[in-house]
Image (cartoon, rainbow, N blue to C red):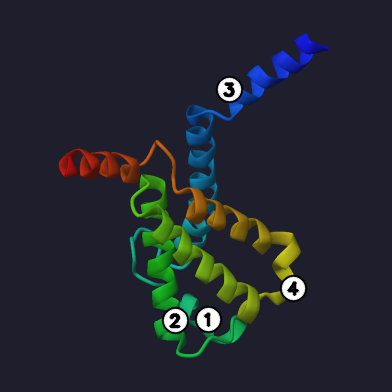
Amino acid sequence: MKKIVGLYDKAVAVISGRAAEAISLLFVRIALAGIFWRSARTKVEDGSWLQMKELTVDLFRDEYGMPFPEVTGLIATYAEHFLPILIILGLFTRFGAAGLLVMTLVIQFFVYPEAWWSVHILWVVLALTLIVRGGGLLTLDHLLAGKRKGAAE
């Protein structure tokens, strides 16, 4: 029995280490960013980076019922492009995740309130994980924090 417990403890130590956490947080970043990036790309003209489709304004006005659909559509389109890039790079990861959390809550409460258990709870968990833990070792945040720490010494 001691041997089994010892093996278990070793396995837990490996999967609880910094490398495993870094890889896990990388996948969390990719998952959350991917959700919003794919949504962002549906809102712009094919072949353009940020030229919003007229259909996007219609979507924000008619389906989402958002006020000022030209403005809210543009803000959402830009945020869905910019924040996932920050998260993938691991640059201001907590800020990017907080922005996507706010977007998720707006979608949940004002657009698709019936989607909590099917979709939005997962987005919230991904965003909260990044807000609480940060992006991990494989980020520009980590690299910059090391440089700041070295400069302060």
Q: Tell me the quadrant of the picture where the C terminus can be found.
A: top left
Judging by the rendered image, the residue that carries numbered circle 2 is 72
> Compared to 2, does 34 lie above or below?
below
Q: CA distance from mark 1 to mark 2?
A: 7 Å
Could you tell me which secondary element the residue under label 1 belongs to?
helix
Q: Position of residue 152 (x, y in %)?
A: 18, 44
* Residue farthest bottom in this picture: 67
Q: CA distance from mark 3 to mark 4?
A: 40 Å
In-image side of 24 versus 152 (left or right): right
Check if mark 1's residue and mark 2's residue have beta carbons within 8 Å. yes
In-image side of 84 versus 62 (left or right): left
Mark 1 or 2, closer to the camera? 2
Counting residues from the start of the chain, the first of labels 4 and 2 encountered is 2
* Residue drawn at (26%, 44%) of the image: 144
Q: Please, what is the three-letter code of the amino acid marked with disc 1?
A: Phe
Q: CA distance from mark 3 to mark 1?
A: 47 Å
Mark 3 or 4, closer to the camera? 3
Judging by the rendered image, the residue that carries numbered circle 3 is 14
Mark 4 or 1, closer to the camera? 4
Counting residues from the start of the chain, the first of labels 1 and 2 encountered is 1
Judging by the rendered image, the residue that carries numbered circle 4 is 114
Judging by the rendered image, the residue that carries numbered circle 1 is 60
Counting residues from the start of the chain, the first of labels 4 and 1 encountered is 1
Kindly indicate the quadrant of the structure image that contains residue 44.
bottom left
Could you tell me which secondary element the residue under label 2 belongs to?
helix
Counting residues from the start of the chain, the first of labels 3 and 1 encountered is 3
Check if mark 3's residue and mark 1's residue have beta carbons within 8 Å. no
